[in-house]
Amino acid sequence: MDIKKTLLTTEKLKPLYEDALQLKFGKMFTDYMFTMNYAEGKGWYGAEIKPYQPLVLDPACSVFHYGQEIFEGQKAYKSKNNEILLFRPEENAARFNRSMKRMSMPEIPVEDFLYYETELIKLEERWIPTQKGTALYIRPTGIATEPALGVKPSSEYLFFIILSPVGAYYSSGFKPCSLWVSTEYARAGEGGTGAAKAGGNYGGSLAATAEAMRRGYNQVLWLDSKEHRFVEEVGAMNIFFVIDNKLVTPPLMGTILPGITRKSVLQLALDLGIEPVERMISIEEVVDGIKAGKVTECFGAGTAAVISPVGKICFKDKEYTINNNETGPWSQKFFDTLTGIQYGELEDKYQWVYKVK
Ligand code: PLP
Ligand code: COI
């Protein structure tokens, strides 16, 4: 697990951002990156922390042709006591490996994954913003690097980690966002790669997202690919509804990303006094429920987006407004509880917080 480190002299370090709250998501990167290579028959080798720099890759690398690429999304938080905290990073490491496996890529032992990312984060401590709502976003990524055009799993890979200081994911901040239901496009199909954090899932979703935006909505609300009827998730978040005072979210059936925020919200629900239910939800149930006053809240949950209240849903050219397009009490409660735990301000009953320092 030895890491070779190439460090910069202080004068060569980049200037920090001025106001972390104003940072655009994923636009600024820190001074260093982590890289490690893999070759068939040799395994993972050459762990290295070095100055952030472009990758030099052969144009025949399989990642460019057949999309063997997967990634993770995590955040490092700074507590008031100057600690560096991660939220359930073992879950990200485990999901990273499930995604790798799904894409026929080699896994990385969870302890090694955590060691590499924490070594990089400790070195980059000065980049972790301190205001509530800000964090250092962590992007571990795996790509196929064998220069070969045959359609087969690559025999070489690169694993890298880059870091980016971030403010809020949505420029609207903690205000309700709006969703457009796509009845034509689908994000994932049964037996496909929907449950993996594979880059191709996101590439395939961009056309629908562009259409949502053209129509004045922030994101797409995806339905199942078979019947275009059951709600699945949003581009970068899992979806929750408060229906008849129960917290309802679609079950994990292979087409949805198993979100770590989702899992945590489901676990926190009972503590906060609302019954969590995982079941299929048709879009008709959602819109009829909004009209009848049974669906009282909707929010998305994800690492980048945290808890994002949803104020409007557009389905078949009709717009439905939820809770007056205002942040509802449950969205607020889950946001406060989750961020309270993540920033080390609330009791960490389930030992979710991983102290880097
Ligand atoms: N769904 C999709 C498609 C995502 O990209 C994400 C973000 O990672 C999520 C859900 C939420 O997952 P998590 O809570 O693990 O960040
Ligand atoms: C995350 O929430 O970490 C994500 O990766 C979502 C998105 C930026 C792809």
Image (cartoon, helix red, strand yellow):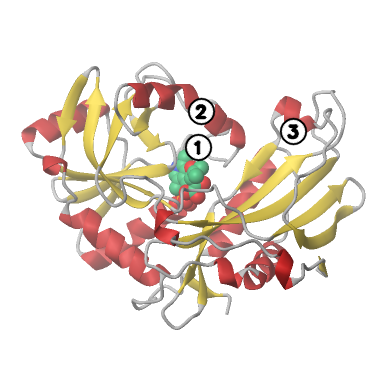
Q: CA distance from mark 1 to mark 2?
A: 7 Å
Q: Where 256 falls versus 9 (above or below)?
A: above
Q: Give the structural element (helix, strand or loop) at label 1.
A: loop
Q: Which residue is mark 1?
A: 254
Residue 342: give its label. none
User: Between disc 2 and disc 3, whose residue precedes?
Assistant: 3
One can see residue 357 in this view = yes
CB of mark 2 within 8 Å of CB of mark 3?
no
Q: Give the structural element (helix, strand or loop) at label 3.
A: helix
One can see residue 269 in this view = no
Closest to the observer, 346 or 217: 217
Q: CA distance from mark 1 to mark 3?
A: 23 Å
Residue 190: give its label. 2
Q: Given the image, on which type of amino acid does mark 2 rest?
A: Glu
Residue ID at (60%, 62%) = 15
Report whether 110 appears left or right of 23. right
Residue ID at (35%, 22%) = 214
Report whether 177 appears left or right of 133. left
Q: Position of residue 56 (x, y in %)?
A: 82, 41
Q: Where 228 falls versus 104 (above or below)?
A: above
Query: For mark 2, does the 10 Å Cα neighbourhood hold few (<14), some (14 to 19), or many (20 or more) residues?
Result: some
Q: Which residue is mark 3?
A: 63
Query: For mark 3, does the 10 Å Cα neighbourhood hold few (<14), some (14 to 19), or many (20 or more) residues?
Result: many
Q: Position of residue 24 (x, y in %)?
A: 46, 48
Q: Position of residue 195 (x, y in %)?
A: 53, 39
User: Between disc 1 and disc 3, whose residue precedes?
Assistant: 3
User: Between disc 1 and disc 2, whose residue precedes?
Assistant: 2
Q: Position of residue 126 (x, y in %)?
A: 58, 71
Quarter-of-image position of residue 212:
top left
Residue ID at (23%, 61%) = 333
Residue ID at (14%, 50%) = 245
Q: Give the structural element (helix, strand or loop) at label 2.
A: loop
